[in-house]
Amino acid sequence: MRFLLSIPRVFHVSDVNHIPAILYWPEGEVVLLTSAHRNRKYDCFPAAGKRRANRDQGWCSVMDNRHQLKFRWLPGGPYAIVRLAPDVPVPDWATRGIFTSISRTAEEISVVCPADNLPADVHSPHHWINLKLEGPFPFSQTGILLSFIEPLASNGIPIFAISTYDTDYVLIMKEYAGTAIDALRDAGHELIC
């Protein structure tokens, strides 16, 4: 998270449980001096009427309006993501398994399917795990996917997202699986069986 500030500032932070922490940003980068407030949004304002050690201090309150979601690790993996030419018929191997996704555009056909389905002449550079968000979610409910992928992006974890009528699926490179699950749990999301 970055703020556009040219001078270092220090703000006190308290969440709904009134746990104090310090928020400091040198040259715009936020640094939290407690792990209790990671991955949260902050509403910062000057400490008007309060005694301050210097003019650059103020107060922040945590505004954690991210959705806390339940998700499942889909079986049938690892999964592959491949690109085919836009004018080829959809191959039979792309439609087998408990989860497949086929998207056709003027430029390509993208296929997500179990890696074991790929014929010898089709290669996927990565293997992926597939996480299913527990929906359904109404179209009017905003921020669902953002709430889920924000902690992944904050931890440098690459994703491939697929939305369906009812829910979202987030594929994560297999080598990032442990880090991803930890980041999601730290953000308040729940892995269910």
Image (spheres, helix red, strand yellow):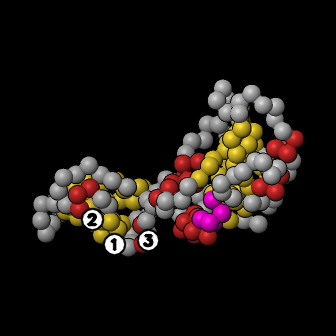
Residue behind mark 3: 36
Nearest the viewer among 186 and 113 is: 113
**Three-letter amino acid code at the position of disc 2:** Tyr
Nearer to us in this view, 16 or 109 = 109
Query: Which quadrant would residue 166 be assigned to in this image?
Result: top right
- Which residue is under mark 1? 33
On the rendered image, what quadrant is the N terminus found in? bottom left
Magenta stretch secondary structure, dominant: helix
Residue 80 shown left or right of residue 98 in the figure? left
Q: Which range of residues does the magenta coloring cover?
A: 173-177
**Rendering quarter of residue 21:** bottom left
Where residue 119 sits in the image (x, y, percent)? 82, 50
Neighbourhood count class around disc 1 (C-alpha, 10 Å): few under 14, some 14–19, many 20 upward: few
Which amino acid type corresponds to the residue marked 1 in the rendered image? Leu
The image shows residue 110, relative to residue 17, as above or below, that is above
- Residue at x-position 66% and y-position 63%: 174
**Which numbered dot is residue 54?**
none
Q: Residues under labels 2 and 3: Cα distance? A: 15 Å
Give the side of residue 74 with respect to residue 177, left or right: right
